[in-house]
């Protein structure tokens, strides 16, 4: 360390660390501009005529009569005049199209055909946003078929990594909401050539939708003031709080945004709620048999108690009280009966107590045994029609599946594959297993689908006639102040429930079994909690400044339809200042401008920039891209398969205590096998090792996109196109990025250190030699998540006191009681000292302390010298990195491209010394070198 410090100072390393300056406006104006243009003015008249002739040919072709008739039969087509009159006359309008109305497919076509008939087709370019890529691609393909065209004639789509755009001038483009936001960020003038913006499924209220609504409103206000053309904006949904949106898009004089409601084309759906379901089960099978089933699942019992209390009346209770008093007495066939649930199950409940307060633990209850019994009841009392059951997550899918196979419910043998086909629908289930959901079953066989909310809108199973709904879903919520992510089980909204019920009436009369009371349904939110109110806001705040909005981000986000609280915005801004993406006055730095272009969280983006500096680019790209995607590893169902999957993950870790390295090595192996031997071999290996190929492809796509963005921004040289790299037995594509920037890409200690820099302050320290609890900067008593390879909760050998683990996220348990570190990697005090937070030294005790909470000493004869050396080395490293970030804005004007960013002599020499020091210390991170400090109150409960 001493040698590196001396050399750096002699080479001219500044003595003081300088603050990053804001990016110059003129630099930002031309950075990353991507233009989308319409037809030239002199090209439009010919296009108008050509489009009109093509439309007339379509309308007059006899062989297309059946195709035209199908479109004409849709309810949306029958409301054509009302929709077009509203859209034409107003800058904003709302279309409520019920399930089966043809909202998504027909509204864009109605608008385009109307413009063509009015001689303005060549100027009509419609963008229709979708919340998910599968919707954008599938709808575009369907609309092209409806128009008797090939994709990309007049209809196309734009999703990440796979754009299939139509030519401008009479076009419809379906794209994800995020794609439109990216286009507006890089080229706000694209609206010159866009005639209509249709924002579909606005009821979902994801962060991109709420953000897009602010951006579009402000863009139209700005264009109106400048006298520019204004695209028509249409908001579309099957269910919507029309009053809220009409007010949000009201005109300056207070005139509400107009709306049209169009009915759907579905079959009647009979709805039953919990009181009716319980009464039906009691009457059919008797209270004793029902009690026998529910006795095996305490959660179902507790759930029924809570629903009884919540209902505040006798509806649920009465339906389960009309049974025999003695549970051992058989109930005559056809005679109403059951257990007295209030007497035998609810002795401690005061029916008159408050029913409004529901704890997270109560919300987390999912009655899987009751659900399984209801599935059995449906199978016993009906002969045909697939059954779709909604549960919140994989855990409940697994439990319900287990109940069906093991409990012999109501005499039904669900192990008989000739009679029952049970399908599991979850994002982690392999695609070939998910595809079974759409396959038909033989006569006499019943399809049962256990699914999360993925089957609400993204997936349609046409033969479903029975929907069973637990009324729950998993929802990610983020505490900005504590940086805690909780994947909570929460009640659905009435909008969700309506969508789920609609799944039962697509092809025939259907039935909807809601396993919650009518009172519960009436108390649900109209729509779900907007993502903007429950998410990390750093990416949004960064994007606001990247789009050159001058106002403070707090003022900007206050214009959202439902604004986040100021404290959440302030925390996000503070975090962006900490990683030097913002200046203290909320101006974008050169580093921040680069991070805003990357399709990942800014903290992970900065980690990738560090990968460039330390010539360790490939692993940082993979790790950064993976954080935005579902797990690369599949979580199989069944204890034997889970044990085998864990052993495989341990093997990939190569002896390191790291979930991240396990994932990294697995990804690299599949990539190498694909490049060397072909996709077939890679797929087989992935299947055998519980690796999700869908996740692999998405991570790879994101990593490639980041490489291209970095090359455009100049920190790295432009790589050889991925499509032209040799593959399939000829040597393969190899690491991402130039070879010069991957010199240290196999250095495990460096990868762990840069990972720590990316996730910090996500660091946990073992708080005692006994037990399993860790302490973090904000919490104590945190546990290692059971899915982590570093979980020792079932091991006799416990992690030693003071051992440190970097983690990707701090997650709250479903019941809200415990906090867990997810995706962990063991790091050393040396790594933490160099790449963690603010490091201080107490001279009297020679104690180093990180961010005023994590103390430790260096065990050596001269503690004072060693501690001062570490502190000075850390300060020098901060100055080296600071100078690197400052240089980002000058790469282009100096003519520096590619490796020029990493080739600064001082930076290169110092970075090499850091790598050498880390490598020398690898393998002995604690023993004989460092001693963990005790917190003031010590032990498990050590406070800050």
Image: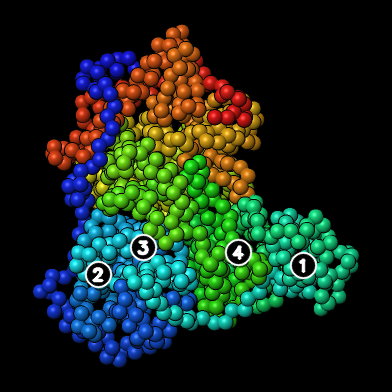
Task: Report the residue marked by disc 4.
Answer: 471
Which label lies toward us, 4 or 2? Answer: 2
Q: Is residue 289 left or right of residue 814?
A: right
Q: Is residue 231 left or right of residue 382?
A: left
Q: Which mark is residue 881?
A: none
How far apart marks 1 and 2 lie (CA) works out to 58 Å
Q: Where does residue 137 sit, x and y in percent of width and height? A: 36, 66
Task: Report the residue marked by disc 2.
Answer: 230
Q: Can residue 60 be spotted in the picture?
A: yes
For mark 3, does the 10 Å Cα neighbourhood hold few (<14), some (14 to 19), or many (20 or more) residues? many
Q: Where does residue 541 sit, x and y in percent of width and height? A: 36, 49
Q: Which mark is residue 213?
A: 3
For mark 1, does the 10 Å Cα neighbourhood hold few (<14), some (14 to 19), or many (20 or more) residues? many
Between discs 3 and 4, the one toward the N terminus: 3
Which label lies toward us, 3 or 4? Answer: 3
Q: Where does residue 337 sit, x and y in percent of width and height? A: 83, 72
- CB atoms of marks 1 and 3 within 8 Å: no
Q: Nearer the viewer, residue 36 or 507?
A: 36
SS for callout 4: loop
Q: Where does residue 571 sit, x and y in percent of width and height? A: 43, 43
């Amino acid at each position: 360390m001493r040698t590196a410090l001396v050399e750096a100072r002699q080479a001219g390393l500044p003595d003081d660390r300088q603050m990053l300056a804001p990016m110059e406006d003129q630099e930002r104006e031309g950075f990353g501009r991507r233009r989308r243009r319409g037809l030239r003015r002199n090209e439009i008249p010919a296009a108008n005529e050509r489009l009109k002739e093509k439309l007339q040919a379509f309308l007059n072709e006899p062989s297309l009569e059946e195709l035209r008739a199908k479109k004409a039969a849709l309810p949306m087509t029958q409301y054509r005049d009302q929709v077009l009159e509203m859209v034409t006359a107003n800058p904003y309008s709302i279309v409520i199209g019920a399930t089966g109305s043809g909202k998504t497919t027909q509204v864009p076509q109605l608008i385009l055909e109307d413009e063509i008939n009015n001689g303005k087709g060549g100027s009509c370019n419609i963008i229709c946003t979708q919340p998910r890529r599968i919707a954008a691609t599938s709808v575009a393909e369907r609309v092209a078929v409806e128009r008797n065209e090939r994709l990309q004639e007049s209809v196309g789509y734009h999703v990440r990594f796979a754009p299939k755009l139509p030519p401008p001038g009479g076009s419809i483009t379906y794209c994800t909401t995020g794609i439109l936001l990216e286009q507006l960020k890089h080229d706000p003038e694209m609206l010159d050539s866009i005639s209509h913006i249709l924002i579909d499924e606005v009821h979902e209220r994801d962060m991109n939708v709420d953000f897009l609504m602010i951006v579009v409103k402000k863009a139209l206000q700005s264009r109106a003031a400048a006298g520019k053309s204004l695209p028509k904006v249409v908001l579309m949904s099957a269910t919507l709080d029309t009053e809220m949106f009409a007010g949000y898009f009201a005109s300056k004089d207070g005139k509400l945004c107009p709306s049209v409601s169009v009915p759907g084309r579905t079959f009647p759906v009979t709805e039953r709620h919990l009181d009716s379901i319980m009464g039906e089960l009691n009457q059919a099978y008797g209270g004793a048999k029902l009690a026998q089933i529910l006795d095996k699942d305490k959660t179902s019992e507790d759930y029924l108690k809570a629903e009884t209390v919540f209902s505040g009346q006798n509806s649920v209770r009465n339906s389960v009280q009309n049974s025999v008093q003695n549970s051992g007495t058989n109930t005559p066939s056809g005679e109403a009966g059951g257990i007295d649930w209030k007497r035998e199950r609810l002795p401690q409940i005061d029916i008159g107590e408050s029913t409004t307060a529901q704890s997270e633990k109560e919300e987390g209850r999912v009655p899987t045994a009751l659900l399984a019994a209801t599935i059995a009841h449906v199978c016993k009392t009906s002969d045909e029609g697939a059954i779709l059951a909604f549960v919140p997550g994989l855990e409940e899918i697994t439990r319900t599946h287990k109940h069906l196979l093991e409990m012999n419910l109501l005499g039904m043998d669900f192990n008989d594959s000739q009679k029952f086909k049970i399908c599991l629908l979850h994002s982690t289930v392999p695609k070939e297993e998910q595809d079974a959901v759409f396959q038909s079953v033989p006569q006499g066989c019943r399809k049962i689908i256990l699914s999360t909310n993925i089957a609400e809108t993204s997936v349609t199973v046409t033969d479903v006639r029975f929907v069973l709904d637990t009324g729950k879903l998993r929802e990610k919520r983020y505490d900005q102040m504590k940086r805690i992510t909780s994947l909570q089980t929460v009640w659905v909204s009435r909008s969700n429930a309506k969508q789920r019920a609609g799944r039962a009436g697509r092809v025939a009369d259907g039935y909807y079994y809601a396993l919650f009371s009518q009172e519960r349904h009436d108390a649900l939110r109209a729509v779900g909690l907007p993502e903007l109110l429950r998410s990390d806001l750093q990416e949004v705040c960064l994007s606001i400044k990247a789009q050159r909005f001058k106002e403070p981000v707090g003022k900007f986000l206050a214009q959202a339809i439902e604004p986040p609280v100021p404290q959440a915005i302030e925390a996000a801004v503070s975090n962006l200042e900490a990683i030097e993406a913002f200046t203290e006055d909320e101006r974008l730095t050169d580093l921040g401008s680069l991070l805003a272009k990357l399709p990942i969280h800014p903290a992970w983006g900065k980690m990738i920039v560090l990968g460039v500096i330390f010539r360790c680019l490939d692993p940082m790209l993979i790790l950064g891209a993976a954080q935005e995607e579902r797990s690369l590893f599949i979580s199989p169902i069944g204890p034997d398969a889970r044990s085998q999957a864990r052993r495989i993950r341990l093997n990939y870790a190569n002896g390191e205590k790291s979930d991240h390295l396990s994932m990294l090595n697995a990804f690299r192996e599949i990539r190498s096998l694909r490049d060397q031997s072909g996709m077939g071999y890679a797929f087989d290996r992935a299947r055998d090792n519980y690796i999700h190929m869908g996740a692999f492809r998405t991570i790879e796509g994101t990593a490639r996109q980041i490489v291209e963005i970095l090359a455009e921004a100049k920190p790295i040289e432009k790589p050889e196109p991925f499509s032209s790299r040799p593959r399939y037995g000829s040597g393969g594509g190899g690491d991402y990025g130039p070879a010069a920037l991957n010199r240290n890409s196999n250095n495990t200690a460096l990868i762990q250190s840069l990972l720590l820099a990316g996730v910090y302050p996500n660091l946990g320290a073992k708080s005692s030699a006994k037990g399993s609890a860790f302490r973090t900067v904000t919490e104590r008593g945190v546990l290692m998540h059971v899915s982590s390879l570093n979980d020792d909760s079932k091991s006799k050998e416990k992690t030693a006191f003071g051992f440190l683990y970097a983690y990707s996220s701090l997650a709250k348990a479903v019941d809200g009681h415990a906090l867990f570190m997810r995706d962990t990697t063991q790091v050393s005090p040396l790594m933490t000292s160099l790449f963690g937070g603010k490091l201080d030294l107490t001279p009297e005790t020679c104690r180093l302390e990180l961010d005023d909470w994590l103390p430790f000493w260096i065990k050596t004869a001269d503690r004072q010298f060693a501690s001062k050396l570490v502190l000075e080395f850390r300060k020098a490293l901060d100055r080296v990195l600071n100078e690197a970030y400052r240089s980002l804005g000058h790469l282009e004007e100096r003519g520096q491209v590619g490796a020029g960013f990493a080739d600064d002599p001082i930076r290169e020499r110092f970075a090499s010394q850091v790598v050498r020091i880390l490598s020398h210390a690898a393998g002995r991170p604690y023993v004989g070198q460092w001693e963990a400090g005790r917190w003031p109150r010590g032990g498990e409960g050590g406070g800050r």
